[in-house]
Amino acid sequence: MPDQISSNQRGQILDLLAKGQKLQAVKLYREWMGCKLIDAKNAVEAMENQPATDHVSAPDQGPKNTSSVDSVRSGCFSVLLIAVGSVTYLLWQ
């Protein structure tokens, strides 16, 4: 199991996040790192919240709402979405 992802892999994760494909980013990170789902989710969210210094990000699309209530709602939905996806995946194997 690798200790960290490469800068190329990080770029791929950030590209997915810029496209709104967070679930795919978590899946890819987990595949590369061989870690638990919650660890992959936390790592991807940490990358999402860090300012991108070495990666070209998507053009600014106006001001974003950064209230704590919205970020909590977003996090809860992500956890719920990942949980439902994981259960569905396990049931269909």
Image (cartoon, rainbow, N blue to C red):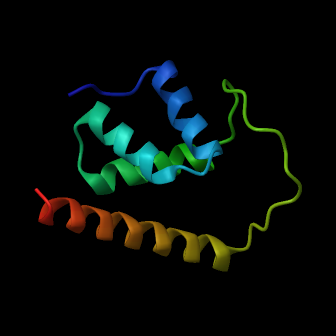
Residue displayed at 53% across by 49% down: 21
Considering depth in this image, is 83 or 46 the residue closer to the camera? Answer: 83
- Quarter of the rendering occupied by the N terminus: top left
Residue 17 picture quarter: top right
Taking the image as shown, residue 92 lies to the left or right of residue 24, namely left
Asked which quadrant contains residue 64, the reply is bottom right
Residue drawn at point x = 28 percent, y = 53 percent:
37
Residue 47 lies left or right of residue 54; in this view the side is left
Q: Is residue 47 above or below residue 74?
A: above
In the rendered image, the residue lying farthest to the front is 92
Identified at 47% across, 46% down, the residue is: 44
The answer to whether 36 is drawn above or below residue 5 in the figure is below
| Above/below status of 53 relative to 82 | above
Using the image, determine if residue 53 lies above or below residue 20: above
On the picture, is 27 further left or further right than 56?
left
Quarter of the image for the C terminus: give it: bottom left
Single out the residue that lies furthest toward the right. Answer: 62
Horizontal and vertical percent position of residue 62: 89, 55
Q: Position of residue 83 (x, y in %)?
A: 30, 68
Choose between 58 and 68: the one closer to the eye: 58
Q: How many marks?
A: 0
Query: x and y percent of residue 19 in the render?
Result: 63, 45
Instruction: From the top left corner, tell me how far across and down residue 32 is, in percent.
Output: 30, 31
